[in-house]
Amino acid sequence: MQTDIPLKRLTTLRAGDLLPLLSTADATVVAVETLELPASATRLDNVLRLRSPGGQEYLHVVEWQGYLDRGVLWRLAGYLAWLGQQRPGQAVVGTVIYLKPSDDVGNTLRQTVDGHDLLVWELPAVRLWELDAIDVAQRGNVGLAVLSPLMRGASAELVEQVVTQVLSQAPLVQQADLLSILGVFAEPLVDTECFVRLVGKEKLMASDLITYLVDEKVAEVERKYAEELEQKLAAMVRPLQDAVEDTVILRFPNTPAILVRNLRSVNDLEQLAALRRKVLEAPDQAAVEALLAAIVPAA
């Protein structure tokens, strides 16, 4: 399951809890913003507006990385460059947070030509699996505790402890969403049925996030089904095209090849079957040529 939505929601709900990951634990969250990138249709989510202990406001971009993407460091660098151009008088920093080892492409942009480093740019990175899940869960930091299933030493028992922590420490209006997010990351440790029994179906259904996650899962299944159906149809179309062509050639061998080729433009199984029937019933070659000429070749 894609983790973008749960992580964006977690950042919105518990931004202050995430500051230790960013090495800014002494800062204060002023706001969590989503900024439009005018050069594309994408949005820049998870932009924290922070205030330092000295009173300076600055921006910290959080780039959650839950899949392998060789361009993630360039993407984060691009975000920082764009923000820096828009707000040259404001400090702008960023951190990439890797969810699992297979997502990790490092934290250094190194451009090497003929064995010489021409550009080396290190970006802050956090690897959640390097953190100790038990230690994090014991800190009383609800936001980080929700991420603990992704950390070293996580277990089903730990997930139960985090559920209790969320129910006892998080505001009531946040509990449903936080438990839903926890459920996403705890899936490898606790099966869905057990997690629902542990938390309670009513509590989970109170989360707006559930609707997004369900819609995402349904869309994923529909895409997979459509792809499989398209592949099956493609495998059936070509033999039927061949069968219609063979029927034309067997009945009327002198039919111009350029007309026979039009059959390759027909991908509908019912239409191909109907064409073969009409070829079999055609009184002469002229009728078949007229039938093939009426097919509009694909562009």
Image (spheres, helix red, strand yellow):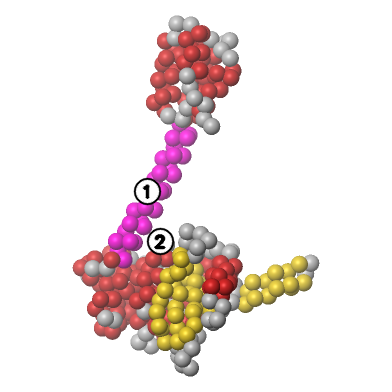
Magenta stretch? Answer: 209-236
Residue 129 within the magenta-colored segment of the rendering: no
Which residue is located at x 42 percent, y 87 percent?
Answer: 28
Residue 115 falls left or right of residue 294: right
Task: Please say whether residue 186 is visible from this viewpoint.
Answer: no
Residue to which mark 1 is pinned: 222
Which residue is located at x 42 percent, y 14 percent?
Answer: 278
Mark 1 lies on a secondary structure that is helix
Which residue is located at x 79 percent, y 67 percent?
Answer: 114
Q: Considering depth in this image, is 264 or 155 the residue closer to the camera?
A: 264
Q: Considering depth in this image, is 207 or 238 the residue closer to the camera?
A: 207
Using the image, determine if residue 242 lies above or below residue 48: above
Residue to which mark 2 is pinned: 1
**Earlier sequence position, callout 2 versus callout 1:** 2
Q: In the rendering, at what x and y percent does residue 227 appear?
A: 44, 44
Which residue is located at x 47 percent, y 19 percent?
Answer: 294
Callout 2: few (<14), some (14-19), or many (20+) C-alpha neighbours within 10 Å?
few
Q: In the rendering, at what x and y percent does residue 20 appear?
A: 46, 85
Amino acid type, callout 1: Glu
> Which secondary structure dominates the residues rendered in magenta?
helix
Using the image, determine if residue 48 lies above or below residue 210: below
